Image: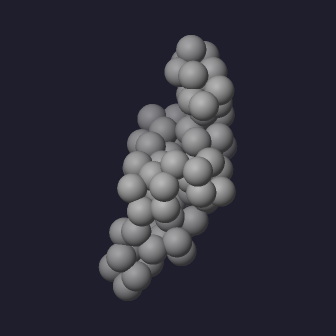
Amino acid sequence: METKRRLFGPEHPLTLKTMHMLAIVYDAQCKHAQAEALDRQALEIRRRVLGSEHPDTVNSMDALGEEYIAEGKYAQGEKILRI
């Protein structure tokens, strides 16, 4: 991820995709805080760059909602998944 961030920039689609994939790895390792941080960061960037209704932004919302649920943060997960 750091190489893509350096080469393409932090807002490039490839950087953001890799950020999401790394969050999946962290989630599988039960490193939920790290996964949540990456998912939140990707969502913030995608909202700013692509807008709230872009498919990639919506996918980031789903990923963050699922991460909240994995952490037992059910109210936060439900809130973001209902948007």
Residue 78, compared with residue 10, is above or below; it is: above
> Residue sitting at 36 percent across and 76 percent down?
9
Residue 54 figure quarter: bottom right
Residue 15, compared with residue 79, is above or below; it is: below
Front-lying residue, 33 or 68: 68
> Residue pushed farthest bottom?
7
Front-lying residue, 39 or 28: 39
Q: Can residue 69 be seen in this view?
A: no
Residue 37, compared with residue 18, is above or below; it is: above
> Residue sitting at 60 percent across and 16 percent down?
74
> Residue sitting at 36 percent across and 69 percent down?
10
Q: Can residue 14 be seen in this view?
A: yes
Front-lying residue, 57 or 1: 57
Number of marks present in the image shown: 0
Q: Position of residue 6 (x, y in %)?
A: 33, 79
Residue 5 figure quarter: bottom left
> Residue sitting at 41 percent across and 49 percent down?
44
Q: Position of residue 46 (x, y in %)?
A: 47, 57
Position of the C terminus by quadrant? top right
Q: Where is residue 18 in the image (x, y as percent from the top left)?
A: 55, 66
Way the structure is coloured: one colour
- Position of 6 with respect to 78 (left or right) is left
Q: Position of residue 14 (x, y in %)?
A: 54, 74
